[in-house]
Image: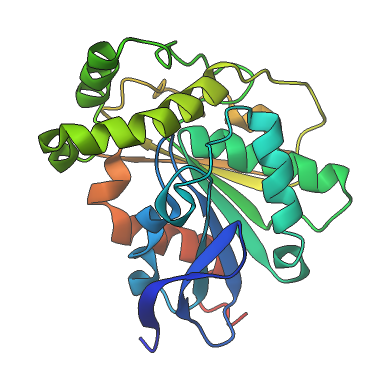
Amino acid sequence: MEVRVRAANARSTWLMSFAEVPAPAYELVCFPHAGGGGSAFGTWQQHTDRLRVSAARLPGRERRFAEPAIDDLTELVGSLAGALVDVTERPYALYGHSMGALVAFEVARELRRRELPLPEALFVAGCEAPDIVDFERVHDLPREDLVAWLRTTDGLDPEAFEYPGLIDLMLPTIRADLGAAERYTYRPEPPLPVAIHLLRGRQDHQVEVAGDSGWGTHTSRVCTVTDFDGGHFFVRDHEREVVALIETELCGEGNTR
């Protein structure tokens, strides 16, 4: 594999990438879970030389830490859609985890409203369909209760709980993200002409693990489901398999695009 992985490179205010990929077949733009940052996808590029892995750079974390996090999903989606105009000029796909799945879905719909080229596929993980998802209200819990919830749901890396001061720095952004997801209101539109692939953890108690979790009604193409062992953040233990799945679905066996 000839991919040279390096530190995250800020391509714009809203987008980062992680390697020089010669003539990628597709660009995969990733959206993190609530409280997460784009660097969570930094190691994905190690597993593919046919995809260019990019990630959203969101306010309130990493190199945009000094900026207040956006607590309104519609505002966030509008900014991200505007930032992806250049990406839509090439073959691309979107991936989102948990709250990021909602963001990816709404970004695709906003791009359609703007009459821009749509992604080849939408990969969503750890989230039920937008019209039925019901996030537990936790964003305004007292500090100790919210930290306990994050611990129970594996919402932070275990090492973070050893540093209370770090958690206090992160909590405003976590609260903003959780609030944005909890206040999200689905507005009916025609199904997207985009294939949807749902990824789930078999032990994820936040997602219904029967059928397609409602996502099939949001595409006029195929909706595929793949289950992995693990909980809400199953991707952490199956990173290589997830990237391989995405690459195969986009590029296909023997597809040289």
189 vs 68: above or below: above
Quadrant of residue 49 within the rendered picture: bottom left
Quadrant where the C terminus is found in the figure: bottom right
- Left or right of 76 in this view: 148: left
Count of numbered circles on the image: 0
- Left or right of 192 in this view: 3: left
In the displayed image of the protein, which residue is found farthest to the front? 66
Q: Position of residue 166 (x, y in %)?
A: 24, 39
76 vs 116: above or below: above
Whether residue 230 is visible, yes or no, is: no
Whether residue 59 is visible, yes or no, is: yes
Q: Position of residue 93 (x, y in %)?
A: 61, 58
Q: Position of residue 189 (x, y in %)?
A: 81, 28
- Left or right of 12 in this view: 133: left
197 or 33: nearer the viewer = 33
182 vs 17: above or below: above
Q: Position of residue 98 (x, y in %)?
A: 45, 34
Quadrant where the N terminus is found in the figure: bottom left
Name the image colouring. rainbow
165 or 230: nearer the viewer = 165
In the displayed image of the protein, which residue is found farthest to the left? 162
- Left or right of 41 in this view: 26: right
Residue pictured at 25% horizontal, 33% vertical? 167
Residue pictured at 43% horizontal, 24% vertical? 175
In the displayed image of the protein, which residue is found farthest to the right? 115
Residue pictured at 51% horizontal, 20% vertical? 179
